[in-house]
Amino acid sequence: MRRAIAATVMGGLLLGGAVATPSVAAVRGGGKAPSKARSAAPAKPRVGSKAVTSKAVTSKAVTSKAATSKAVTSKAATAMKTVAYAGYEFQVPASWPVYRLDEHPTTCVRYDVHAVYLGTPGPDMRCAAGLVGRTQTVSLIPGKGAPARSGAVGSGHSAALEAPEAPEAPGATELQRLSAVHGTITQNAVNHELKVALGQGTPGATVLGTYGTDPAVVEQVLYTLRLAPAGTAPTAQSATASSPGDATSSQRAELSAQRAPLAQPPASAVTAKASPARAAAAKAPAKTKTQPPSTSWRGVPPGWPVEIVQPPHLPPKPSPMPFHPVSGFDTCTAPSTSTMRTWRADYAAAGVYIGGANAACAGGNLTAGWVKTVASMGWGLLPAYVGPQAPCWSAGHGVLISPGSAAAQGSAAGADAIGDARSLNLPAGSPIYYDMEAYNGGTSCTNAVLRFLGAWDRAVQAAGYVTGVYSSQDSGIVDMQSGAIKKLPGFTPPDAIWIALWDNVASLNDGTLTWPLPDRSKQYSGNINATVGGITLNIDRDFVGGPLARLPRGSCGTGRKASRQTGSREPPWTHKLTIWPYAATVLTPLST
């Protein structure tokens, strides 16, 4: 799913596959660092201030920017261009490509490369699975009934914008009123987003800006928002969008054809190996006759009475609940319900991003209604939240953990993840997995990651959700296990782990991990093109034995009740349940 991977294969690192993006096709190369391949983003514009403003910006906004404009007088002005769509226009850095989603609905809306997106994201976006990170982008999403052509908006348009929408996300703060468009800039600092709701009436629109570390460039763009003059034509697409008909489609088809069928795990993947002593006993020849019990004891006089006491009869141990790992996949954005219905023939679990400051793709189809619909098809979900990454993560643009405030950031991310889960009607007892991409750093970096994850875990667990962490086995997973065993202050281990190990082996059996098999899932292959029922997606493949989210039946909850105790606690494997209640419900591919 959108992630940096460290895949240990025959003692080395193997990364393969091709990623197609709206602006460039990035090809993975063997021998590179253990992280997701990323497209080469356009050069970051050198914008040192908010000097570019609209004539329609209020005098207050102009005054607040005047002081900063002097800071760039000695520098060459950044080239800007005007973009018009759905009755509005604004200025963006000239190097940013423009994508028309109304004309190319399969374009992937990516937040990890500079771009402008005009229109509503399509239901079948072609997104690569390995995207993580966030930088400056701007999306203009028209309201219902709003035409693309700017001139179609009449003089009555501004009247419909008199009552802008209130901030939607919890914790969003108002930054600036834009009188030119009767809207207000709001900021969600946790998700690194800026938004302008341009009224509740028709046509209306929403402008969404994302940023990595500095919102200044996006703020500058939003300050230039204004109504487009009558007759202004909408801006045309300036970049080539990848689609099934492009040159990349043949390469994807070849990759898909070369893939072997999904490997089925051997029985040893889910059953304990027999001990050497038991194996030797099994090979030993059976005894031909039973020796009678001895009634004498050396040193005891022969005439003494002897009573043989048999050990008490113990009831047989109950049979363990069956453990049924299932085939799963994950991708950057939620596929359409029609795709999910088709793909249910081969898969039973799906990883979906529910939020986070480093979510690189638009959510697209992901709504509470989507979750309800796919759950009714028999899907189990792995809800993933991708927030700040390790301080030593260097796979691309994005938000990083600050070592000095790692715990505070973790708590904030946990609260945001809970809000995202509740917005999708995922009840308490459902798992939420934190996506911590592969990283490579020293003790300081590792300790910051563990403090962050510990705070995130406590926040999510306190709300009644099951906690999980997705990470590379060679970084996040091994560091969490070490931190739990050493009882590192500030770290609380998660209930479940989702291991990233691209060894092409669909198995959960690893003797070096302490988490029980029913608490593990594994991403064993990534960035591949798979086809089911004629529908092709770029996915990561998973073998899922850990907790899955499913909507409750009636008034019952999903998943399991949190078995961990509050306060200081041992690593989860020492006292929590090792069999998830929903493991009894077997999720298997539908018969064809």
Image (tube, helix red, strand yellow):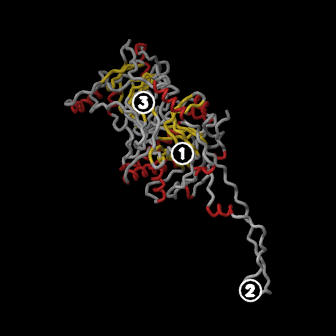
Earlier along the polypeptide chain: callout 1 or callout 3?
3
Q: Residue at x 62, y 50 (%)?
A: 270
Q: 498 or 527: nearer the eye? A: 527
Q: Residue at x 44, y 35 (%)?
A: 360
Earlier along the polypeptide chain: callout 3 or callout 2?
3
Quadrant in the picture for residue 380 = top right
- Outermost residue toward the left? 74
For label 1, count other residues whose C-alpha is less than 10 Å away and answer few (under 14), some (14-19) or many (20+): many
Q: Secondary structure at mark 3?
A: strand
Alpha-carbon distance for marks 3 and 2?
A: 89 Å
> Is 7 positioned to the left or the right of 429 in the image?
left
Q: Which mark is residue 522?
A: 1
Q: Relative to 507, does residue 223 appear above or below in the rendering? A: above
Q: Which mark is residue 300?
A: 2
> Is 256 positioned to the left or the right of 442 in the image?
right
Q: 14 or 348: nearer the eye? A: 14
Quadrant in the picture for residue 375 = top right
Percent of width and height locating residue 87:
40, 18
- Residue 184 can be seen, yes or no: no
Alpha-carbon distance for marks 1 and 3?
A: 27 Å
For label 2, count other residues whose C-alpha is less than 10 Å away and answer few (under 14), some (14-19) or many (20+): few
Disc 3: which residue? 25
